[in-house]
Amino acid sequence: MTNSSSITHFLLLPFSGTRQLQLLHFCLFLAIYLAALLGNGLIIGTIAWDHHLHTPMYFFLLNLAVLDLGAISTTVPKSMANSLRDTRDISYAGCAAQVFFVLFLLGAEYFLLTTMSYDRYIAICRPLHYETLLGSRVCVHMAAAVWACGFLYALLHTANTFSLPLCQGNVVDHFFCEIPQILKLSCSTSYLRELRLLVVTFCLVFACFVFIVVSYVQIFRAVLRIPSQQGHHKAFATCLPHLAVVSLFLSTGFFAYLKPFSISTPSLDMVTSVLYSVVPPAVNPLIYSLRNQELKAALSQLIPGCFQKQ
């Protein structure tokens, strides 16, 4: 039994106890991390460099790439370092920082994806009012609200979680620090405060989900009324990447947190956490670049020979 005031570090769950598999984990995470850095870095650089991409859709995409870079950089480097050094340690302050930044960046990303669905709704359903409703100032204010909401969301959860007394040891059954695993170490009924906050969070997540669904119902209804096949193709080309990113983000997140307790094990929890925290930041740039001709054209100009048209 330990008190939270005496805890100076936590022990994270390793991917394997054998040295060979630890090195394999390091190499796999390094490859994924470099792919995420390259993909998101190219998107950020291309959008910032090409003035033709200075539109609301690409402005929000740039913010998404920044959030993805931050999210994967919060968890993966520490996990790689632990595997390389054959250790499990993370400091108390480092654990609190990891919880804060994971919540901040992933929360802001979800709010941003909700905002991007509104952008697609205006572009498809009200194209004549697009520049009026989504001017540069409006976009900046919406992005600022997204980042601010993510920051406030993370601050409330982190402060509430780490104010709880911890007396169930310092072993975190995860490869990074997250709230459900920290709550398992609490010895006080005051953890119910955090559970109530999680219920409020779930309601907010559900409200955003309903907004995204309603937006896409309206989008698909509008697309089906477009008479030309070329119009269909253009509309789907701009909407499907965002819909794919939203589906990947929500499906992995929902499975990680809403799966039945009967099948929950530390190993399965770790795999699902990789799916929602590591895979999307690495895959999102690929999803957006495959079908987006404007982005591919800008990339080919920025890097000669890249994404040449077939």
Image: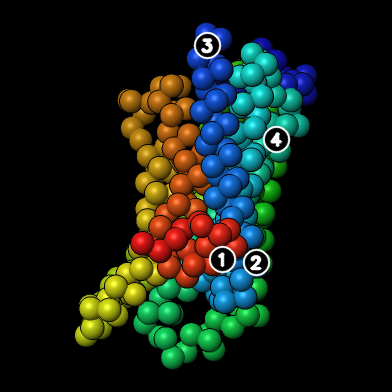
Return the x and y of residue 37 as percentages of the image width and height.
60, 45
Write down the residue under mark 1. 301
Return the x and y of residue 125 as percentages of the image width and height.
36, 82
Q: How far apart are marks 3 and 1 (CA)?
A: 42 Å
Q: Quadrant of the N terminus?
A: top right
Q: How far apart are marks 2 and 1 (CA)?
A: 13 Å
Q: Which amino acid does label 4 sit on?
A: Ala
Task: Give the residue drawn at x 51%, y 71%.
Answer: 57
Q: Distance between the residues labelled 1 and 4?
A: 42 Å
Q: What element carries label 3?
A: helix
Q: Is mark 4 on a helix, strand or loop?
A: helix
Above or below, 59 against 244 in this view is below
Q: Is residue 101 visible?
A: yes
Q: What element carries label 1?
A: helix
Write down the residue under mark 4. 96
Q: What residue type is labelled 2?
A: Ala
